[in-house]
Image (cartoon, rainbow, N blue to C red):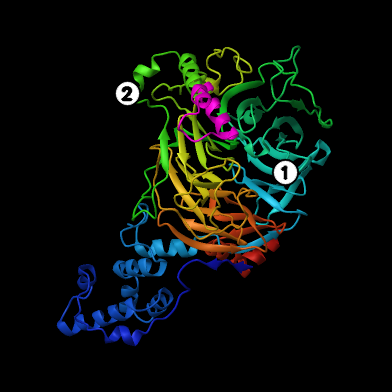
Amino acid sequence: MSRGSCCRPGGFHHRDAAAGAAVGAEEGLPAEAQRQCGGSASGRRRPRLVYQIFLSLGPADVLAAGLVCRQWQAVSRDEFLWREQFYRYYQVARDVPRHPAATSWYEEFQRLYDAVPCVEVQTLKEHTDQVLHLSFSHSGYQFASCSKDCTVKIWNNDLTISLLHSADMRPYNWSYTQFSQFNQDDSLLLASGVFLGPHNSSSGEIAVISLDTFVLLSRVRNKPYDVFGCWLTETSLISGNLHRIGDITSCSVLWLNNAFQVRAGRAPAASAPSSARCPPPCAPPQDVESENVNVVKRLFKIQNLNASTIRTVMVADCSRFDSPDLLLDAGDPAGPPCRVFDLGIEDEDEDEEAASPGPTRAKEGLRRLLDGILEGGAQPPLSERALETKVAELLAQGRTKPPERGTAGALNKLLIFTTGCLTYSPHQIGIKQILPHQMTTAGPVLGEGRGSDAFFDSLDHVIDVHGHIIGMGLSPDNRYLYVNSRAWPSGSVVADPMQPPPIAEEIDLLVFDLKTMREVKRALRAHRAYTPNDECFFIFLDVSRDFVASGAEDRHGYIWDRHYNICLAKLRHQDVVNSVVFSPQEQELLLTASDDATIKAWRSPRTVRVHQAPRPRPRPFFSWFASQRR
């Protein structure tokens, strides 16, 4: 059993008590400290000397000194003393207030030191290749892992973790498994994988596994594979498909799929994504179109420019935005805030232009563009890629459906994903509202009923992070979005969509409030990544009530406090840490997955003490009494 290294400014240590005692006893103490030093002048002088000495000690020495006598014990529990210890030891900015839920500085100091899962308690070595992702069930009783060994493993989360089931996906032409997610009632597991194929292939598949029988229920094609997929309801999931329009222009289609695919007499339109039902035992993959009625439904169709695509979809439940506002924005910002664009609000100056039909405006814009090119205007000549992007933008102007506003008070959900508008590198976060009537697979199938003039769907909000996004995670209340990003150089300009700017080795962990749609916190920093932008891969992060954790390429996992903006622990592996996950029922348990083919379980020091505490032995009389009754 080992303890992760500390991100705090050093361990408990003893400062020079003599130097502290030399400080004049009459130097001003805070009023709350002076009140504890009542009595005569000589009586006040001795406690003040003790106070000055205690202020110069480290936390461990303060606690040790408090065992000497009652007077020193009272001083060692003083609130002012522990307030000073807290800000000094954790190096928290003085303008950051105490956590709203904390009742004392002493208990808050103890929480950050004793409740952080930084003690390694178990190493799981059942995988034979890199472990890429971990996910917990909502109950916390089970978790799943995905790996380059092409298996999805389901584990029983007990005091000692044990393997429950392993599903080998190689018979279905999978190269490896990359992502998993439990549905809300923990009856089904979504597992996402990558198909075998050339290096530049982007095809993948999503499988649904029953957690009662471990039977593979259904499979749905997913392209590109790093859409990953996610649950929208307990029995419906979101997948993606990609259609090329030009060299660097495409459209992404997001589909709503039923986890249980029931055969019917007719097939939906041929544009549906390929899927196959797998009755037990599962049949080999079938390259056929779906034969299900009202099982596949098109949610959104979104235009992609400059070689960008939609990736990493997730769903935030707006009905859970009921937690009190966290004090996340204390202190000075570390840099310029990321821009959040509300695309659902139109300027009044554009009303007159918007009154004309969209297709007419698009045709006029396209005609002006072509006339300018033919006449050889003064503007610099456009490259083929720039011309393709400009034409695609103009053609989409009249074919894009404006954002649809939900009913006030409706419990809507937000679809969140990475995207971009300048290059293939994911540098923006798209947000699209999902209305109640869109959350069911019943109704018009495959986008039927959509007007011919509304070919694309527009986004409600776009967050531009000016960097390469390599990870996203939601807080337990779904209100705060945490984003791992590797920044572009300041002032960089993307001249060629196929050559994005270089990215920083240092990872910024950004925080956005999905209720107010603004950045609310300075970037958390400590972790690093080294892969260049053309090979950059996802590093998964997770958020608990009080902490946020992330993997990194520097062979460590990291834990920060959400309120104080400080790094609390580094968790060592032998290779890249790809994924971290807190138990949803016990934030003092954290799992980390690494390229070293291991999964490590980490618990807090106080949890370890509780589990290791010897059980009381039965008293001899009761032991004898029990033996006589047998």
Q: Give the range drawn in magenta.
A: 370-395
Query: Residue 591 has which mark?
Result: none
Q: In this view, does 288 lie above or below 138?
A: above
- Which of the pair 117/504 is nearer the observer? 504
Position of 126 with respect to 513 (left or right) is right
Residue occupying the point 43% across, 75% down = 60
Q: Per the image, is 172 magenta?
A: no
**Residue kind at label 1, given as amino acid type:** Thr
Position of 62 with respect to 555 (left or right) is left
Distance Cα–Cα, label 2 vs label 1: 50 Å
Instruction: Please identify the quadrant where the N terminus is shown.
Output: bottom right
**Residue kind at label 2, given as amino acid type:** Asp
Q: How would you rate the neighbour count of disc 2 (Cα within 10 Å): few for under 14, some for 14-19, many for 20 or more?
A: few
Q: Where is residue 407 in the image (x, y as percent from the top left)?
A: 41, 21
Query: Residue 349 has which mark?
Result: 2
Q: Earlier in the sequence, mark 2 or mark 1?
A: 1
Q: In which quadrant of the rendered view does residue 99 lie? A: bottom left
Is residue 155 in sight in this rendering? yes
Residue receiving disc 1? 177
Q: Per the image, is 376 magenta?
A: yes
Residue occupying the point 38% across, 27% down = 345
Is residue 304 in sight in this rendering? no
Q: In which quadrant of the rendered view does residue 605 lie? A: bottom right
- Which of the pair 235/295 is nearer the observer? 295
Q: Is residue 172 above or below residue 436?
A: below
